[in-house]
Image (cartoon, grey):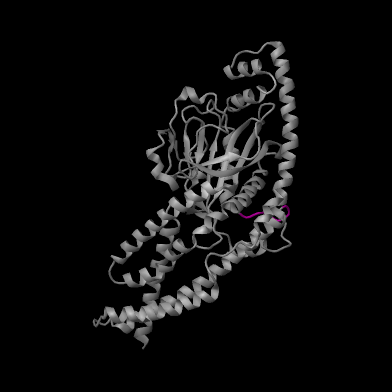
Amino acid sequence: MKNNQSILSQIKMVSFVSTIFFALLLLSGCGAITSQNVPEAFQVRNTINAPTPPPGSALVVIRWPVAMDDKAQSVFDSTWFSGHDADASARSTALMAMQGFAMLISLGSKNLIDEVQNNKAVYKQIPEASTYYAMELYRQLLKYIPETQIILEPQLLTALSGSFKSIPLTEGKLPVVFAVDILHIPNISVDPYFLPYFTIATSGLASPKTCGAVASSINYNNKVEAFMEKECLDLTARNSRKPEYLDHFYSKNEGINKFSEVPLREQLPLTSNQLMLFPMIGETFSPEYLAQSASPSFDSSKLPLQNQTIEILVKALADGISHYDLKKATQAGLAEYVSGYDKPLSDGLKSGATLSEQEQANFAVVTQLADMEKQWITKQDKLVADNILDGAFGKSFRATRLAYLEMQNQRQQASMAQLDSLAMSTINSGALTGNFNSLAMMSNALQREIQYQSKLSEIGSPAIVMIYEKSSLEEL
């Protein structure tokens, strides 16, 4: 009996490790690392002193999908999950080919594959999750950049010819040095894990070799839409080239789009004419913080938000601004803004021509108007961000994260019970005594699988409904 218990422990350990390994492959196939394991090459250790932008412009605009339409949902339905299904099937086949504990591993991972197939509505949480984490990005960026230099611009996620596209929901024309796009796609498996997809872009003139692309969190996407350098010089930070952060979800479309290879960089600081490739960095929040932040009394303006992943990105962003020519970064944007007041002056700015005294005076008046507009917009943006983080929306979102953690813990307990049953099936089948009966093992395993599924049904469906109502977005 004691020997059986020892064997049982060994089988459970191997099965548990194997199942976790499978989960990591399936759910983190993009090769993500945790924020605690980020290499020094991607961390800023020096003091950050953000520069002042040219008159009439701001340093950063943050963009994120606050909503998605039916076209985008159709692409997710037809492309993203079919890819995950195929990936899960391929991994399962590979695992089944393994000898020894293949049965335990495949059955232990079965429920992860089921989640891929049954929790396909998870992408509908993208607007809510992206909205919340974009506001966390904004809040942490305020530690290094004044609020008067950060603009918020929500977008609609749609699709054109099978490719994702973002449409601005506000008419943003104020020139900016950097445009940051951030998006969070919740895991297929219910959990509070945070894995951001982001890109940073500047004007084409400030980085002509990359046509404005500055950085991307997707380390396997080093291509941008095809371009010629001379065509990039008039592009602003908002409309310059950048690696599409959802490109890998519709890789079949690469046969339609043409791409250009660009000079790459894998070490900070952000540098002109090189595309900085960040690893995919994920955040696993501590149970203590999830519980604390889920409290109705939690106030993020008084208690610090704990998100090391965003902190790493924010520091790289804030530090990187000082490594770019701010005049070049805003020249096209200023020309575009001025065109609404003085077209000849706009043409002169665009060409880089020397301005006459009268043109300089006109330009000073327009930039003063732009600064006044910036003061009003950024003040409203801060109110919006504060309301999202500490209003009903933010409180409900954090409460949902805690609910995810509790469900995850329940599922892990059920999984350990299943592994115990599967291991005992192996012993009862005689697999470790030389009297192996595959039919007996299958029969024992299936009986215990039924018991396991019964236990899961008591916990609830993995497609947990978000606690907060979508009407909370009206706070925007």
- Where is residue 94 drawn, in percent x and y? 31, 61
The prevailing secondary structure element of the residues shown in magenta is loop
- Where is residue 344 drawn, in percent x and y? 64, 15
47 vs 361, left or right, is left
Q: Residue at x 53, y 68 (%)?
A: 408
421 vs 348, left or right, is left
Q: Which residue sits furthest left?
A: 434
Q: In this view, does 184 lie above or below 430?
A: above
Q: Which residue sits furthest bottom?
A: 1
- Where is residue 416 drawn, in percent x and y? 46, 75
Q: How many marks?
A: 0
Q: Which residue is drawn at 49% across and 46% down?
A: 40
Residue 280 seen anywhere in this rendered image of the structure: no
Q: Which residue is drawn at 72% across and 49% down?
A: 386
Q: Does the magenta stretch include residue 37?
A: no
Q: Quadrant of the N terminus?
A: bottom left
Q: In this view, does 116 lie above or below 275?
A: below
Nearest the viewer among 87 and 1 is 87
Nearest the viewer among 187 and 5 is 187
Q: Is residue 302 magenta?
A: yes
Residue 447 seen anywhere in this rendered image of the structure: yes
Q: In this view, does 452 lie above or below 70?
A: below
Give the magenta range: 301-306
- Where is residue 115 drawn, in percent x and y? 46, 64
- Res 410 → quadrant: bottom right
